[in-house]
Image (tube, rainbow, N blue to C red):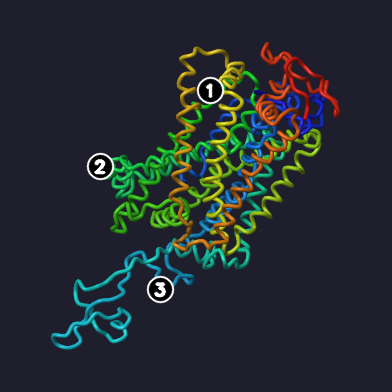
């Protein structure tokens, strides 16, 4: 619904009359909701949603409903979004750094340079071999001893160890200046801090007018990555070994027997779950700016299909170049395929460095990562500012720009820990916990709250008020998903993940006990508000304990469509905010007293 009434806990404020000349400059004359505004065009909304869903995860891997009866799940989703925006912009800062570093005649990670150590090599390094010191006597000795004493290794006796790629050492020693672990914070890496500041300036500039400005920016940031992916696919398809990479991706070399393993299905489910940005709050925040009768069903189908097809399309572009990398290095594709940071900032830069005109392709690739990340970041920050908008509408009318920029500044300062020499460990820690179990828990609780507490059938009736009534057969599949299939699957995935929990690590360096404890504390801090808000609402209610619980599980008297003309028969008796005072809410038939 356009905007669902907030509960008395948040003190619903009176509505102001707004005209086109209002100082709230982000409101347009054609907006259906003059208090909050609407998208200027449907395309602004769709591109923003596609940009939010199609993010770095496709190449790399406010919730107004939940404000009912206290909003505990809404608070959880906003807090998770805050944690995620902190580290997500650091990844964007990495992309900015690599993009700027690519503006050279030769990519700085193309060869082992002054920053490299003796293990830097694109080919395996000989550590030991057999030599014949005396006639008939053969010994295995260190390769350095062989070189110093001018001996020759016997053919076929060499013992190899993998060398570290130049791109890997550049990532660790130059870009990150990575410390030995989370215990060694080190200093702030100044150039990463500057890139992080620039990333937040871009986000703040795009969002200072809210959806009226961000809706225009996404025309470039959402479309440009597809242009780059198409260019990279065409370029990759012309390289030697490209077919080998594609065959590994989806073809003769694919290991389809893995489909029998439950772990594969678990990974696939969580990837889709995270890729679509479900339960982060951003989807609801962006959708809330639609007009009341917007067809949210068709939007959901379009965005899901676009997201999934983008992942498949990106896979062809990525694996064609990884196939070329395997071809020239003499390795199997499985040996060069990596994920996460290793793919984006080690494997792919290494492949780009070996292409003719490497700097050009590198600039193009990291600019694509930048635009992919910014789309998702816009929506995440919009989730935070939209929450402020609904809690303090009068303040946001007058001070949207400074409040948005202030939010970006605070988040930048919080993110400085992620650009220290131990920064990558913090990024991985937040990603592992908040974007892992935290979002799974939030999704399960959100689903339970809407379907089992608010009522799935009531929720369907609310949707039908917006998109029009549908036959019962239309809702059969969705009822099965919402009531049974999805909660069971998500709960199974969550339990399975907790049972198989192992200490997180980065670059084979395990996290200390206090680091793991901080990770769990972040999750607890996000979800603790759900029981806190429930207890507060139960205390504020009247009657016996059972009556209070039942009362708090019912929609508040001011719950329903924001605009009176959309309320119909179902919500015709809802309490209007213009009639409220700070001390009393007029009672209506079947409504409960304010808490």
Q: Report, in whole angstroms, how far the alpha carbon at label 1 lies from the one at label 2.
A: 38 Å
- Give the residue at mark 1: 297
Secondary element at tag 1: helix
Q: Position of residue 184 (x, y in %)?
A: 57, 68
Q: Single out the residue that lies furthest toward the left.
A: 136
Q: Earlier in the sequence, mark 1 or mark 2?
A: 2
Q: Position of residue 431 (x, y in %)?
A: 54, 50
Q: Quadrant of the C terminus?
A: top right
Q: Earlier in the sequence, mark 3 or mark 2?
A: 3
Q: Residues within 10 Å of mark 3 (few under 14, many from 20)?
A: few
Q: Residue at x 51, y 56 (%)?
A: 102
- Of badges 1 and 2, nearer the viewer stands 1
Residue 118 is labelled as: 3
Q: Earlier in the sequence, mark 3 or mark 1?
A: 3
Q: Position of residue 435 (x, y in %)?
A: 54, 46
- The residue lying toward the viewer, choosing from 365 and 548, is 548
Q: Residues within 10 Å of mark 2 (few under 14, many from 20)?
A: few
Residue 252 is labelled as: 2
Secondary element at tag 3: loop
Q: Position of residue 458 (x, y in %)?
A: 59, 20
Q: Report, in whole angstroms, how far the alpha carbon at label 3 lies from the one at label 2.
A: 38 Å
Q: Single out the residue that lies furthest toward the front.
A: 544
């Amino acid at each position: 619904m356009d905007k669902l009434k907030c509960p008395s806990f948040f003190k619903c404020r009176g509505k102001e009359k707004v005209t086109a000349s209002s100082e709230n400059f982000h409101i347009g004359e054609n907006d259906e909701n003059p208090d909050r505004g609407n998208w200027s065009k449907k395309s602004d909304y769709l591109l923003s949603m596609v940009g939010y869903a199609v993010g770095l995860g496709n190449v790399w891997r406010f919730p107004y409903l939940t404000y009912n009866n206290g909003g505990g799940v809404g608070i959880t989703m906003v807090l998770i979004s805050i944690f995620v925006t902190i580290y997500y912009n650091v990844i964007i800062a990495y992309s900015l750094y690599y993009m700027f570093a690519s503006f050279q005649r030769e990519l700085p990670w193309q060869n082992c340079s002054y920053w490299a150590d003796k293990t830097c090599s694109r080919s395996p390094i000989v550590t030991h071999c057999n030599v014949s010191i005396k006639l008939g006597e053969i010994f295995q000795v260190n390769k350095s001893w062989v070189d110093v004493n001018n001996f020759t290794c016997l053919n076929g006796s060499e013992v190899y160890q993998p060398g570290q790629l130049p791109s890997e050492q550049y990532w660790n020693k130059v870009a990150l200046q990575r410390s030995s672990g989370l215990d060694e914070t080190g200093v702030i890496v100044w150039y990463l801090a500057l890139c992080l500041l620039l990333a937040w300036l871009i986000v703040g500039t795009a969002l200072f007018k809210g959806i009226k400005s961000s809706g225009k920016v996404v025309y470039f940031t959402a479309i440009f990555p597809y242009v780059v992916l198409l260019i990279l696919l065409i370029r990759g398809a012309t390289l030697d070994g490209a077919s080998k990479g594609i065959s590994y991706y989806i073809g003769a070399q694919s290991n389809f027997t893995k489909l029998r393993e439950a772990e594969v299905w678990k990974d696939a489910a969580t990837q889709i779950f995270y890729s679509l940005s479900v339960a982060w709050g951003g989807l609801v925040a962006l959708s809330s700016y639609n007009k009341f009768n917007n067809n949210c069903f068709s939007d959901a189908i379009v965005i899901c299909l676009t997201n999934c097809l983008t992942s498949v399309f990106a896979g062809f572009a990525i694996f064609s170049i990884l196939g070329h990398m395997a071809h020239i290095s003499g390795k199997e594709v499985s040996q060069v395929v990596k994920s996460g940071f290793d793919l984006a900032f080690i494997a792919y830069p290494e492949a780009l460095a070996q292409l003719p005109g490497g700097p050009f392709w590198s600039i193009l690739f990291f600019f694509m990562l930048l635009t992919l990340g910014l789309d998702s970041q816009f929506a995440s920050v919009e989730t935070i500012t939209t929450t402020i908008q609904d809690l303090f509408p009068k303040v946001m009318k007058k001070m949207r720009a400074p409040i948005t920029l202030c939010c970006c500044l605070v988040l930048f300062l919080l993110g400085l820990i992620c650009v220290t020499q131990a920064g990558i460990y913090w990024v991985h820690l937040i990603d592992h916990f908040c974007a892992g179990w935290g979002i799974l828990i939030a999704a399960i609780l959100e689903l339970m709250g809407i379907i089992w507490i608010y009522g799935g059938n009531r929720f369907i009736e609310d949707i039908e008020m917006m998109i029009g009534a549908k036959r019962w057969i239309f809702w059969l599949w969705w009822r099965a998903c919402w009531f049974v299939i999805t909660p069971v699957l998500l709960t199974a995935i969550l339990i399975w993940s907790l049972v198989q929990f192992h200490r997180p690590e980065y670059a084979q360096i395990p996290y200390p006990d206090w680091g793991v404890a901080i990770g769990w504390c972040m999750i607890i801090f996000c979800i603790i508000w759900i029981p806190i808000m429930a207890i507060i609402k139960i205390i504020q209610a009247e009657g016996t304990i059972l009556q209070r619980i039942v009362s708090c599980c019912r929609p508040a008297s001011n719950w329903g469509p924001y605009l009176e003309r959309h309320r119909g028969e179902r919500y015709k008796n809802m309490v209007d905010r213009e009639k409220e005072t700070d001390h009393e809410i007029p009672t209506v038939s079947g409504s409960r007293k304010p808490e």
